[in-house]
Image (spheres, grey):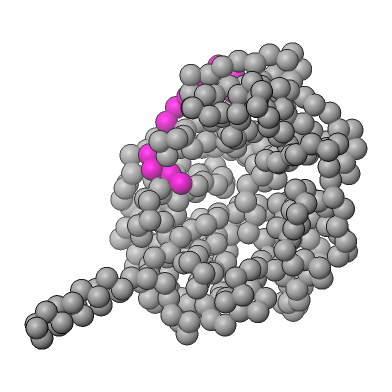
Amino acid sequence: MKKFILILCMITLVGCGNVVPPADMNVSEIESETVTEMQSEETVAEIFPAVTDIETGEPDSTYFLNHKNILFSDDSGRYYYSHKNGRDDGYYVLLHEDKDKKCSFVENADDFSAYIYKENVFYGSYRNSKLCSFKDGKYTELKYEEKDISDFYFTDEFIYCLCRNDAGTEFLRMRYDGSDPESVAFINLNVSKYAVHGNNIFYEADYMKYGVYDTETNTDTSLDEGGAGSFCGDYMYYISTEHHLCRMNLNDHSVEKLCENVRLFAFYDGYILYQPYSDGTTADGQIYRLGKGENVKILDADQIFKNSYYYDVSAIQTKDEHIYVEINSGPYFSYIAEIDIDGNIVETIYSHTSV
């Protein structure tokens, strides 16, 4: 009986040895020597099969508007989400950090989820409103008549949205102040994802159906494969249902698979930075650099922090010659940092592990 209890205790300890960090873990301490050693030994290896002889160039402006933003910035400083009353409150609040590094929570920003920040105005969702603008602590709800709208997509001039019904999906758009609302397309499919490039709407619908709708000619063209992604040069880059990173030629709609096992990606300086798709393994805390003849690991959360746990790269944001990453581990760990193209930590912006 004693042997049985001892074995059971050992199994329990092994099974619990790789969970979320404890509340008192000091994750702001970075082991620079470990990071350097990891980069010199591991980044030379090509881990995942990939097409490396590519250089993306500059992405379309819609990429920056629709890619998930970790932080927003203007002349006064920068904004990002932070726990207001400790991790146990279960929600984040928008925080403003001025140029002197003084932080204060944005007034009336509780329960607000910001999608983009454009010309000193936030656009996002607040409580029961689907879409609203937020400036100087005041909200203005943006509606399209009385229709139930969702799935917003932002261009330089317009906010696009979807209205679904039993017959299919209607594509609507309006300006950022809510003016000039109009219906631009209707597709008799249940559209799940879409992306707008000029007059063309690339979409993905239920049952793996793909297409592109030309709003100028009202022409709907079915595609054998495709999706909704980000535009860069003559291509649309997207992640397929098989978790492959692909790109579609915008002229002839031909598709090329670039890399297998990709969960999210970002453009930077001609490279593609991506997180491997690994379905809940330690690779969720890694970032690779693809392009210019390379496919190498540049960041591994297990090598950055002193303790080895399950980490997840939840976002990679690239803009204005900066690379920002957000790393999480359940509700007990949140970390935002700026890195360089080699994965080195430039600045730890936010680290939260305790109440």
In magenta segment, residue 187: no
Pinpoint residue 166: horizontal percent, then vertical percent. 65, 27
In magenta segment, residue 256: yes
Q: Tell me the quadrant of the picture where the N terminus can be found.
A: bottom left
- 228 left or right of 330 in image: right
- 80 left or right of 146 in image: left
Residue 239 vs 277, above or below: the answer is above
- 233 left or right of 240 in image: right
Residue at horizontal 68%, vertical 30%? 165
Residue at horizontal 65%, vertical 68%? 92
Residue 348 vs 267, above or below: the answer is below
Which of the 4 image quadrants contains residue 229?
Answer: top right
Residue at horizontal 33%, vertical 39%? 49
Pinpoint residue 301: horizontal percent, then vertical percent. 42, 65
Residue 282 vs 16, above or below: the answer is above
Pinpoint residue 131: horizontal percent, then vertical percent. 77, 48
Total labels drawn: 0
Which of the 4 image quadrants contains residue 41?
Answer: bottom left
Pinpoint residue 282: horizontal percent, then vertical percent. 36, 60
Can residue 125 be seen from the camera position used here? yes
Task: Provide the residue span drawn in magenta.
Answer: 249-263
Residue at horizontal 74%, vertical 67%? 110
Which of the 4 image quadrants contains residue 85?
Answer: bottom right
Looking at the picture, tell me which residue is in the foreground, 134 or 238.
Answer: 134
- 103 left or right of 345 in image: right
Can residue 52 be seen from the camera position used here? no
Q: Tell me the quadrant of the picture where the C terminus can be found.
A: bottom right
Looking at the picture, tell me which residue is in the foreground, 164 or 200.
Answer: 164
